[in-house]
Image: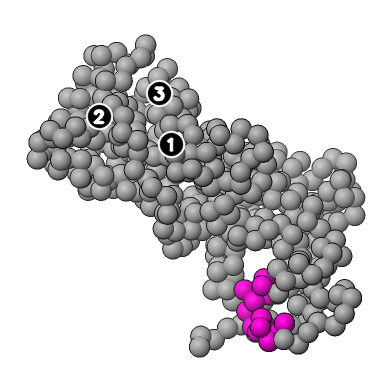
Amino acid sequence: MEDQEVLPLHIVYEMFSLLNSPVPSEVFEDIRVHSLADIVAAAEIAVECLNEAHTKVDDFVSVVNQMSDKTFKENFRLERQTYNALLKVMRSKEDLMELFYPREKAAVNAEEGEFTFPQSGTEIVRMGTAILIALWYLANPDSMRVGGILFGVAKSTVFKCVHKFCMFLTAIKHKFITWPKSDEHLRSSEQGFFNKGFPGAVGAIDGCHIEISCPEKHRHSYTNRKCWTSMILQAVVSSDKLFIDVFVGYPGSVHDARVFRNSGLYEDTSSNPISRFPNRELYILGDSAYPLLPWLITPYRDSGRLTQQQKHFNYRHSAARIAVEHAFGLLKGRWRVLQHLNVSLEFMPYVIMACCVLHNLCLMDGDLVEEWQFSEDTTPLTVNTDGYCNDTFSRTNIRFAEQKRASLMENL
């Protein structure tokens, strides 16, 4: 049996302290409290047995502080040094501190990293603790109720911590999710795809379905073709699996091509192509759900008459594009709340965006984690996008895109 950190049993006893009858000894025999995972299991039992408003653990933060680096990462899904870097970033954004230091509570000492919630009026939570609470929720498939029990705060306080944290990260997303613009960044982005036979590619685009709880309204709109409810995350990913463009919020029933046409990426490039692609040699890779454009190279549509060369191109194209699927796997593997998101529809895009920001922050800091394996069918719908045309991209531009793809195929 692997060695496990032994954590104080009194934490679990506190969870059951308000039971009307003594806790049966077999409960603890079944739980065998030795690790943090066991405490979570005990918390879940406590939730079923107790009135959550009166059940709290008072010193869980001290337990977190005593965790080994390995245990900390197992439970918060990032390394302690990454957490410290995140805390530093948040404290440095004075223009956004209003999210954490409401004017109604001006007496709170910001230097000590504390803030209060006007709605509750009594609970004071240090910023470091608030971040831990939010990270716990994003990293674990536990309810906010369990998080409240562990951190010794009300469920409403957990919600406020998560809400403020996600809003904050969304507000600073441009600091971590950036399109490569400088020559150095463009060369760096190109290198990974160049090694796979696609010189000039700076990223790969795809859509990902984030499973959500079935909404009360517009259920049909959020039900995807696999018959489960989801929200769509569209992302462009570099060869090193960093998000360089993110667009989120469309219901699961919407096709990738429509999401793409309504995204900021498409709108920006339609009005000013050089804003994203300074020269005509640059482009991104996309699957057959997307249109073939001068700056978006898709595979050849398989109508049963592809040449061997075209089939080889499609194979190599798929191998290069796998970076975006790996990025989605890493995202869901680290921030497990995305495996089934249960918040309001209005708040869901902020949670997803915050997880994308954290994904980049971790990778930039060399903080790696295992990839989550997709259970969904990622095969795009078969649509004929090679003939795509609109007012902005004329047939001349489409022909240029076809020639560009043919040239890439010849050089593979």
* Number of residue marks: 3
| Quadrant (top left, top right, bottom left, bottom right) of the C terminus | top left
For badge 2, the amino acid type reads: Glu
Tell me: 411 left or right of 39.
left
Q: Position of residue 94 (x, y in %)?
A: 71, 43
Residue sitting at 81 percent across and 58 percent down?
154
Residue sitting at 79 percent across and 70 percent down?
49
Which residues are the magenta region?
Answer: 27-41
Q: Which residue is mark 3?
A: 269
Q: Which residue is mark 2?
A: 281
Is the residue marked by circle 3 packed among few (<14), some (14-19), or many (20+) residues within 10 Å?
some
Using the image, tell me which numbered label, if any, was put on residue 305: none
Q: CA distance from mark 2 to mark 1?
A: 16 Å
Task: Determine the secondary structure under disc 2.
Answer: loop
Task: Determine the secondary structure under disc 1.
Answer: loop
Relative to 407, does residue 116 appear above or below in the rendering? below
Q: Position of residue 394 (x, y in %)?
A: 29, 13
Using the image, tell me which numbered label, if any, was put on residue 179: 1
Q: In this rendering, which labeled residue sits more in front, label 3 or label 2?
A: 3
Q: CA distance from mark 3 to mark 2?
A: 15 Å
Q: In this rendering, which labeled residue sits more in front, label 1 or label 3?
A: 3
Magenta region includes residue 40: yes
Is the residue marked by circle 2 packed among few (<14), some (14-19), or many (20+) residues within 10 Å?
few
For badge 3, the amino acid type reads: Thr
